[in-house]
Amino acid sequence: MTSAAARAALDLTADLPVARLTDLYRDLHRHPELSLREHRTAGQLAEHLAAAGYETAAGVGGTGVVGRLRNGDGPTVLLRADLDALPVREETGLPYASETDGVMHACGHDLHVTWLTGAAAALAAGRDAWRGTLLVVGQPAEETGQGARRMIEDGLYERFGRPDVLLGQHAAPGPAGLYPHAPGLIMSAATDVDIVVHGRGGHGSRPEATVDPVVTAAYLVTRLQTVVSRELAAGESAVLTVGRIEAGTRHNIIPSEARISLNLRSQSEEVRRRMLAAIERIARGECLAADCPREPEITVGNTFPVTVNDAATDTTVAAVHGEVFGAGTVFDPGPAMGSEDFPQLALDGTVPYSYWFVTTTPPQVWDRAPGDTLPEKLAAVPSNHSPHFAPDLCTIAPGVRTLVSGALALLSVA
């Protein structure tokens, strides 16, 4: 038997303006904006929310947008989408490819904004079907881990009301038409670390008169690979990535410093602490062995918390998604190593939330990807942050429907 929430969701999304939403998506994709510079994107979302009847505010936390729709007594449900793009040069060849050099919506946030816009309009038009309050949030700077915190610090809940529950979703690789859920840990913590190795520069012909930071940095990069492989138990999930190494200006100059940027992924705070301690120990040890004139500078940067769904909330949302989209479309993929700042909106876990994925790989891309198993194909198709990441436009309507049905499962359905 189909629940009232599922029936209402199907009714409210039966006649979605898919053509207009597709035009919006293409426009957003053509005009990506980096973190905390999402002025045009935020303006687009704010205009659509105001047109749908929401009390709308812009500039929250810098470039964030909030829409509020009160509709009688009932719970307050927050729907969130992130706004920002990435410093990636697009290589999709799409007719609506980025027109901003070196910037691309390579993570699907343009699709998230489109989904949120469509869901907000559908729920506003169908307000006879539910009771409560909707908070619709366009969050900046997810990619840098700043946006959710900035909106909270700017009085998001003091100004617009504290929600009873949060809902969020993310475009992901995988054959379009699946909606992975996990009633607990679904995404990992992430931490950025920057290391500056100090040497003593000089002429390339006289290395004996220098302390070469490039060589020390190379040893450091290699040794850091042992943090996961040799310092953590086999059953503990963690990733250490050297995302950037920079040094020098010319072929024949030994530089005075080298810079290394790391990204850590872990699924517990204890593992994160152990990794940070190992990084510091190894960096200081390598610099000591090289006789560097100064100890290395080690700076811990942006940190993303683990994303842990409230089991009851996620079970409720997953159930309505199963009703709306059919058997086999909802499954538990286990925790991913990706990270989000969405949990910061939950105020240290005091607000329950459900966060899920929407798979978006076009069928033709998936079918011709090499491999026979799901993991093999996932490794072969463009992933988030790839210059080839191009979600299928057929996911626009389903992504709206996931938000609408999830919201209706938690609001008071009339």
Image (cartoon, rainbow, N blue to C red):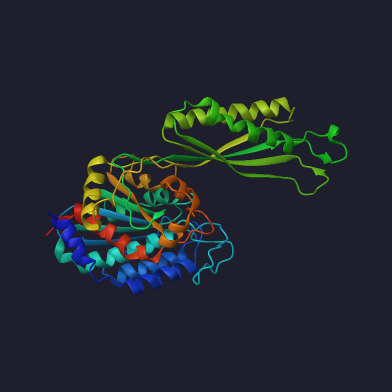
- Quadrant of the snapshot with the C terminus: bottom left
33 sits to left or right of 167: right
Q: Which quadrant of the figure has residue 120?
A: bottom left
Query: How many dots with numbers?
Result: 0
Q: In the shown orientation, is residue 219 left or right of residue 71?
A: right
Tell me: 12 left or right of 39.
Answer: left
Q: Is residue 171 above or below residue 40?
A: above
Q: Position of residue 209 (x, y in %)?
A: 85, 33
Residue 260, how many percent across, how many down? Answer: 63, 41
Q: Which is nearer the eye, 343 or 26? A: 26
Does 105 appear above or below 264? below
Image quadrant in which the N terminus is located: bottom left
Residue lying furthest front in this view? 372
Frontmost residue, 333 versus 32: 333
Q: Residue furthest right?
A: 205
Quadrant in the rendering for residue 15: bottom left
Say if 42 sits above or below 196 in the image: below
Is residue 71 something that shows in the picture?
no
**Residue depicted at 25% across the width and 40% down the height:** 311
Pick whichever, 348 or 168, lies toward us. 168
Residue 258 visible to an observer of this rendering: yes
Residue 401 is situated, as x and y percent measured from the top left of the image, at 27, 61
Residue 31 percent across, percent down from the top left: 49, 68
Quarter holding residue 24:
bottom left
